[in-house]
Image (tube, helix red, strand yellow):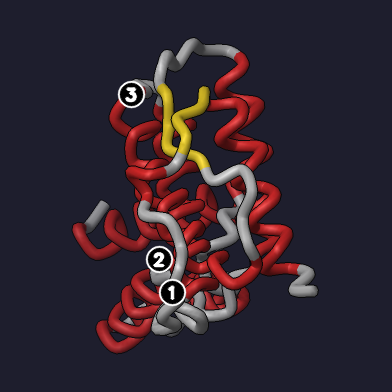
Amino acid sequence: MSALTRTVFILKKKIAKDLENKKPHLRSPSIQCYLCLLLNSHFLTEAGIHVFILGCVGAGLPKTEASWHDVIHDLKRIEELIQSIHIDATLYTESNVHPNCKVTAMKCFLLELRVILHESRNVDIHETVSNLIILANSSLSSNGNITESGCRECEELEEKNVDEFLQSFVHIVQMFINPS
């Protein structure tokens, strides 16, 4: 097996794995599937390989139209995963967010997620939390430059256990979904 064929095989396996996991922060795989079909045909040339590699790189980039619904999905997944392990951490939690402080509160929640990353040795939790951070930051980017005044700093928030933290996190994400 030549090095070129081996590289194509490895890249195809990576795309298949990403499609199987259905990671929401990945771009639409339709182009990548097309490239796989293209490479399986008689277009297996150096130019075809370059296009294929660029397609694979594009598949790993965060999409720009991330959804708060995807964030909630990942939060629910983290809740399920945490049931199987014990994380003895208290996290700064905003449990009574004023609508005018939701961006500030979201930034605090995202900072506190890093504590879960640090405390957990579970690979699935690491992947899901990392994905959630990417999705939330992408969704937040449209509101990220807003300056909110009168909001509490993260360190001023009450410390709560992981379960209460995640429940409050879902609540604030719902404020972004249904801004009323």
Q: Identify the residue under disc 2.
A: 60
Looking at marks 2 and 3 on the same chain, the residue that comes earlier in the sequence is marked by: 2
Distance from the alpha carbon under mark 2 to that under mark 3: 26 Å
Q: Nearer the viewer, mark 1 or mark 3?
A: 1
Q: Amino acid type of disc 1? A: Ser
> Which of the two discs, 2 and 1, labels the residue nearer the N terminus?
2
Q: Amino acid at mark 2?
A: Gly
Q: Is residue 164 above or below residue 128?
A: above
Residue at image x 50%, y 75%? Answer: 63
Residue 20, percent from left and from top? 61, 48
Structural distance between the alpha carbons of marks 1 and 3: 32 Å
Q: Earlier in the sequence, mark 1 or mark 3?
A: 3
Quadrant of the image containing the C terminus = bottom right
Q: Nearer the viewer, residue 51 or 62?
A: 62
162 or 45, which lies in front?
162
In this image, 34 relative to 179: left or right? left
In the drawing, what numbered circle is on residue 106? none
Q: Nearer the viewer, mark 2 or mark 1?
A: 1
Q: Is residue 107 above or below residue 156?
A: below
Vertical arrangement, residue 173 with respect to residue 51, above or below: above
Residue pointed to by mark 1: 149
Residue 56, percent across and down?
39, 70
Mark 1 and mark 3 in contact? Answer it, CB < 8 Å. Answer: no
Q: Amino acid at mark 3?
A: Glu
Distance Cα–Cα, label 2 vs label 1 = 36 Å
